[in-house]
Amino acid sequence: MPTLYDHLGRRIELSALRREHAAPSLTGIRTAWSGESVAQGMTPAKLARILRAAADGDALEYLILAEEMEERDLHYASVLSTRKRAVAGIEPSVEAASDDDRDVEIADAVRELIRAPEFPGLVTDMLDAIAKGFAAVEIMWDTSGSAWTPREYVWRDPRFFVFDRASGQHLRLLDEGATFEGRPLPPYKFVTHLPKIKSGLPIRSGLARLAAVSWMCKCYTISDWMAFAEVFGMPLRIGRYGVNASDRDIETLKQAVANLGSDAAAVLPDSMRIEFQEAAKAVGGPELFPRLAEWLDRQVSKGVLGQTMTTDDGSSQAQATVHDDVRMDIVADDGRQVAASLNRDLVKPYVDLNWGPQQCYPRVVIRPEDPEDIAALADALNKLVPLGGLGIEASVVRDRLGFPDPGPDAVLLGQAMSVAPDMPAQAANRSRAVNRASQAARDAGPDAEHDELLDVAMADWEQLMRPVLDPVQSLADRCASYEEFLAGLPGLLGEMNADALVRSLALATFTARGLGDGGE
């Protein structure tokens, strides 16, 4: 195997790819247990300290808080999950580098790679970066066979990593010998995703940082709301005693008032009484807390999804369509960035380890489907392909549509169409093309007319000849010798279908006779 280098020019050590580098331990700096809660007892001062520390390079408490926010807030967890699943639910496709046989072979292998049952989990784990600002997944390479293949993708706790102190842009792995600055990640061993949600330090780009203040305010709002709900609607109990009441009498009255709240029963002297007054209902008081909580939720929806129509507000179909388009812009960008990380950290290592360095590599594409795109592409191809010199590769079109490259023995759609029973429609289209060409050619002279008619007649000769020649080609592929091939030729007549060719020749002959031979 030739010497390999990653996209940063670092040499690949094959022995390092066979080891596990970021495994957690019961003790030490990479423990799987987060310890005590960070979200509990949150105050504005505490939150400011956590966010400031993360921006300064110490993101431990921030990462724990980001995890707890997803566990404690139903709305934040819902909208964040919606954004993740919008990308994770897209069926990825693979675009070959070219139509060259080797490039098609490599692209097919990458397609098998992304069809593996472990791949969807990899994409989901990468999308954890949307909330926290980064995600790292370790590749467990399987070398038991003749090829290097990922056996497993293991999500690694973000708390196991730090950013370099110089630029704050490059992830490093915490280790016992490097508890502060960390060690560089071994190339071809980790799939890292640092989404470009905003410009600046990656640790400041996570949506958890954006939503943290609203989350804290909502926690206060709900706590006050629950305290208000505990006493809301209960009548105010007032105990009255006379001027001659002793301290013991007053204490007895207090106890009676308290018992009415819990036991609904009390005993007190005739000289004392308890009055019940309806609780005061301030204008808008009962609606204050839900309105504030809903307003905070809408701000979180805007920050995570870019809209509120599909999560918070009632809306018409037209409004929802407009706002869903805005969100689809975010989905398209998330998918593009995830695909870029996969192409850099998974596709290139996989291809290099099995086929060696390439001039161009196949690309994984994660693009949200738009039904109008396929119709527009088909219409464009129908108009542009007949023009000479455009040079559109068939593999590019197949990849764009998500279709795999055909196998050697596959029945192609063009073959099926050539023997389809809708030949009258094809003949009509061909006749119209001939008439247009002949009319244009007559204006240029008799020689040009014959040339144009010949061009039209020969435009689809490959499609017309396939039902006749494909059985011959198939026989040649099966035979091991020339004698065996000759012996099999007589049996091919029943497999050949010349109906389309005969119709085409008959139409061309009829057209030529109808137009005349120009006196020749």
Image (cartoon, rainbow, N blue to C red):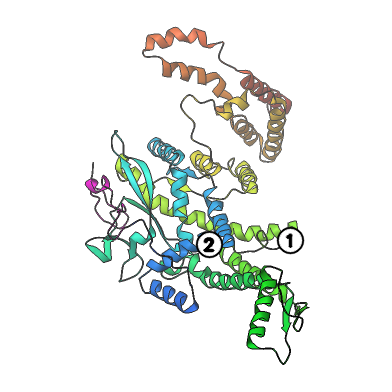
Disc 2 residue type (three-letter): Arg
Task: Tell me, for residue 164, which label it has, or none.
Answer: none
Disc 1 to disc 2, C-alpha distance: 28 Å
Q: Is residue 478 above or below residue 142?
A: above
Horizontal and vertical percent position of residue 337? 47, 56
Task: Identify the residue shown where x is 33% and y is 70%.
Answer: 167
SS majority, magenta: loop
Q: Which residue is mark 2?
A: 72
* 410 versus 237 height, above or below: above
Q: Nearer the viewer, residue 15 or 397?
A: 15
Q: Position of residue 103 (x, y in %)?
A: 39, 39
Residue 140 screen position, x and y as percent = 33, 44
Do we see residue 229 in this rendering?
A: no
Q: Magenta segment: does it hold 186?
A: no
Give the residue pinned by disc 1. 315
Q: Nearer the viewer, residue 394 or 211?
A: 211
